[in-house]
Amino acid sequence: MIRTPVVANQFYPGDPRILRETLAELTPTSSKEKKKALAVVSPHAGYIYSGSVAGETFSQVEIPDTIIILGPNHSGRGARVAMMSQGEWQMPMGNINLNSELGDLLSHSTVIEQDHIAHSYEHSLEVQVPFLQYLKKEFTILPLVVSHIPYSDCLNAGKEIAAAISQYNKPVLMVASTDMTHYESRKSASHKDHLALEHIISLDPEGLYNTVVGQRISMCGIMPTTIALIAAIELGATKAELIRYTDSGETSGDTQQVVGYAGCVIS
């Protein structure tokens, strides 16, 4: 199966030359040694709004040959936790093969199901791929789309992903795709988002989940972020850091109705 792009020329340039030039502007070069990360948290809005946060975050980590991308289900289609592990993704800068080997290791999951329907119109994973392609020539991905599920299912999914990565026995980077608070004032969004980010930084997935749900914080990728954080802890994570936080008002000038964006590295 070949999945074609659904938000090229909307969220990011569809022309490969222009896309590469855009990514060069959004992704800083650094002489610092890149971090060996277990997971990153990266936003998924249009590049004009959140691309600089994503670029800065990805530029700080080593990109391995295998990447699990977890994003929220915006369409409501398909399985609650939908994995697509057969075929390839067609992208402007070249096709990306899906990792069937790692997918097979998750085939007996109690939570994760094989389902391509949830991926057909979902943009939150797609927008991460060009940054990865800009920084790494060859890699495979295992994409997972996550609907609203209870913490117990996040816990099971995170542990199962960690077990699969351990059995896979090769470096894997997890990318949790999420925007933060949606359409509130900058003051309100920043306050709420930092309540959530504190739990990411302190490696507290249950606290993150309960805070976002309990405070009704409109962080769309709370489920994938919780799952990635659980899996990273299972794999030995000891540190998480906030790379950058901003909001859409930085681009639009409107600080009364913003969307928050954060980039984090978990290692």
Image: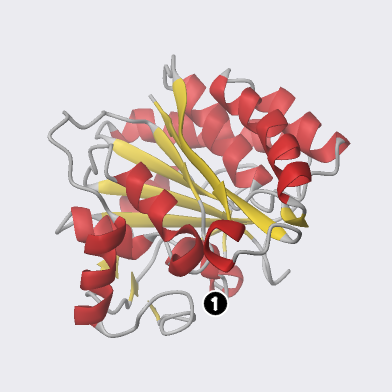
Quarter containing the C terminus: top left
Residue 206: give x, y in percent of width and height.
71, 25
Measuring 22% from the left and 62% from the top, which residue is drawn there?
A: 24
- The residue nearer to you, when weighing 116 against 203, is 203
Quarter of the figure with residue 194: top right
x%, y% of residue 204? Answer: 63, 20
Query: What element does badge 1 sit on?
Result: loop
Residue 125: percent from the left, percent from the top? Answer: 48, 61
Count of marks placed on residues: 1
Q: Is residue 59 left or right of residue 175?
A: left
**Colour scheme in use:** secondary structure
Q: Looking at the picture, tell me which residue is in the foreground, 75 or 201.
A: 201
Q: Within 10 angstroms of label 1, few (less than 14), some, or many (20 or more) residues?
A: some
Residue under the image location 76 percent in, 50 percent down: 218
Q: Quadrant of the N terminus?
A: bottom left
Furthest-front residue in this view = 253
Residue drawn at x 31%, y 65% as measured from the top left: 130
Residue 86 is left or right of residue 259, and the answer is left
User: In this rendering, would 196 be left or right of 25?
Assistant: right
- For the question of whether residue 248 can be seen, the reply is no
Q: Quadrant of residue 222?
A: top right
Specify the amino acid type for callout 1. Ser
Q: In the image shown, does 215 or 67 lie closer to the viewer? A: 215
What residue is disc 1 on?
A: 120
**Residue 214 visible (yes or no):** yes
In the image, residue 187 above or below residue 119: above
Residue 132: image quadrant is bottom left
- What residue is rendered at 43% in x and 50% in y? 53
Q: Please, is residue 36 above or below residue 262 in the view?
A: above
